[in-house]
Image (spheres, rainbow, N blue to C red):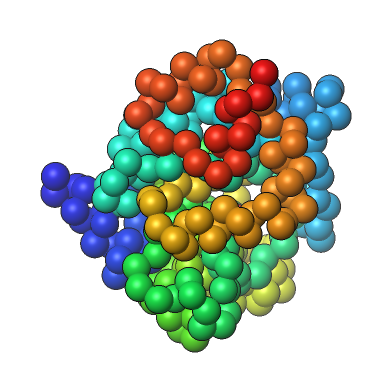
Amino acid sequence: MGEAMDARRQLETRGWTIRRSVFSPNEVADFRAKVAEALDDARRRQTVLVEDGAEGRVEWCVGDLLSYDELGAIILDERVVRFAQDLLGERPIYFADSTLRLGANGERAWHRDNIDRDFDGPDWKGDYPIIRIGIYLQDHATHSGGLTIADGSHKEAAKKGHGRFPDIRPGDVAGWSLRARHSTEAVRIRMMPNLVLNPRLQTRIPKWARVPDDELRMTLFASFARHHTLFDRYVDYLKTRDYFQESEAASRYSPQAHRLLESSGIEIGGAATEIAQRV
Ligand SMILES: O=C(O)CCC(=O)C(=O)O
């Protein structure tokens, strides 16, 4: 009970929280192997998307994670679902907004993932109903490559917030509001590893001055929501986004995925409802 309330309170006050040691080291190693297998499989089927940048390549599979049985089992693991439920205060709705990212390309920038990102639209009226769960399968407590997030930035569109590097360790699971400003592939500086620069400046730190990354970056992201008009609005918004249309068109749920959906106790909504009806 205490853990759930603490998590919810942190989400409300800072815009993000970490649940510690959700997965064991063996599970994390197993998940890394599964992510690598899913990518190999997708490469063979030519369903991999690639984004090259100044520092390397990021790859991800087309289709939501539930379309890949072994990855769906990670994001709908009962411990992840419980964490999402603790943060939302109700049974989470899964709406097929999930992806994995393998590798790093240096494309850093502050951004939000809600609709009214930097102006004071409807998203900013009252409590916000959508969160993203991030599962990072390597260390970011003493390495670069993790999440950069701005404390308090989820409260107002005009609020930039205070930049932080959450010390995410393998097995931890992060959760944040889609309204929170954040960036990818955090660069820690060797001399001052907790100094959070603007992500675009992070990119300008030379390699030799950076705390190195841990293993090859593997991350899984899944959004969850609770019933709310702003969630309905977000579902409509996703339908207008090319990347999401492509992902939805490529998604299929196997009998195993259907069983997982049922046993997980989550609700489905948005695109997931339509995908689940496909044969
Ligand atoms: O890659 C990360 O660490 C953050 C992911 C991200 O920016 C997003 O989900 O919008």
Please report the residue visible at 48 percent of the width from the left and 71 percent of the height from the top.
123
Q: Is residue 178 at all visible to an observer of this figure?
A: yes
Q: Which residue sits at x=65%, y=43%?
A: 101
Query: Left or right: 42 with respect to 9?
Result: right
Between 4 and 261, the one lying in front of the other is: 261
Work out whether residue 50 or residue 265 is closer to the camera in this orientation and state it.
265
Question: Which percent across, then down, holds residue 52?
Answer: 83, 52
Q: Is residue 152 above or below residue 66?
A: below
Residue at 70% x, 48% y is: 244
Of the 4 image quadrants, the one containing the C terminus is top right
Image quadrant for the N terminus?
top left
| 244 left or right, relative to 136 | right
Is residue 135 visible to us here? Answer: no
Expressed as whole percent of the image width and height from the top left, the position of residue 34 reads 60, 23
Residue 155, percent from left and from top: 39, 76
Name the residue furthest left. 2
Q: Quadrant of residue 146?
A: bottom right
Classify 242 as above or below 121: above
Q: Residue furthest bottom?
A: 158
Picture quadrant of residue 106: bottom right
* Above/below status of 167 relative to 14: above
Across and down, in percent, residue 171 comes to: 41, 37
Q: Residue at x 55, y 35 (%)?
A: 273
